[in-house]
Amino acid sequence: MVKVRNASVSDVEQLLDCEKAVWESLRGVLPDEFLEGELRRYGSAQARERTRRFLESPSSIVLVAEEEGRIVGFVEGSVAAGVSRLGVIGVREEYRRRVPRFIPWRVLVKGKFEPG
């Protein structure tokens, strides 16, 4: 069963792996030159550090969908001056249509995720 929870700094590696898988799933939909540029970013120490900083930021909202300890999807956004912004939603191809769809709306309305 897929469960949604707030992301933590310990999720950096799996989160980047999931983001990369989402980009990979777009081959044939987006131009290869664009995808290659995006994919190059995910293996670097700089990407890990940037993701860690984003997760630690009090204005960031990052949720992960997880099944059996594996991150299968994510939602990233932020809250600033009382305004919530949805940045990215990504779900591994094999899990699409299985991750709860109401999550982004709850985050935007409340500015945070509260399980339940």
Image (tube, helix red, strand yellow):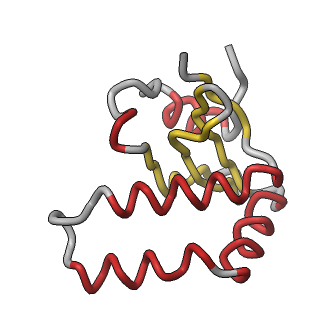
Q: Residue at x 72, y 71 (%)?
A: 48
**Rendered view: 18 above or below 102:** below
- The N terminus lies in quadrant: top right
Tell whether 96 sits left or right of 85.
left
**Rendered view: 67 above or below 88:** above
Q: What is the tally of numbered marks visible in this picture?
A: 0
Tell whether 21 sits left or right of 33.
right
Q: Residue at x 60, y 41 (%)?
A: 71
- The C terminus lies in quadrant: top right
**Residue farthest to the left?**
28
Residue 113 position, x and y percent, is: 69, 32
Nearest the eye: 83 or 37: 37
Residue 84 position, x and y percent, is: 60, 50
Residue 100 position, x and y percent, is: 46, 24
**Rendered view: 16 above or below 38:** above
- Residue 112: name its quadrant: top right
Residue 4 position, x and y percent, is: 62, 28
Q: Residue at x 60, y 61 (%)?
A: 16
Nearest the eye: 32 or 88: 32
Q: Residue at x 58, y 52 (%)?
A: 76
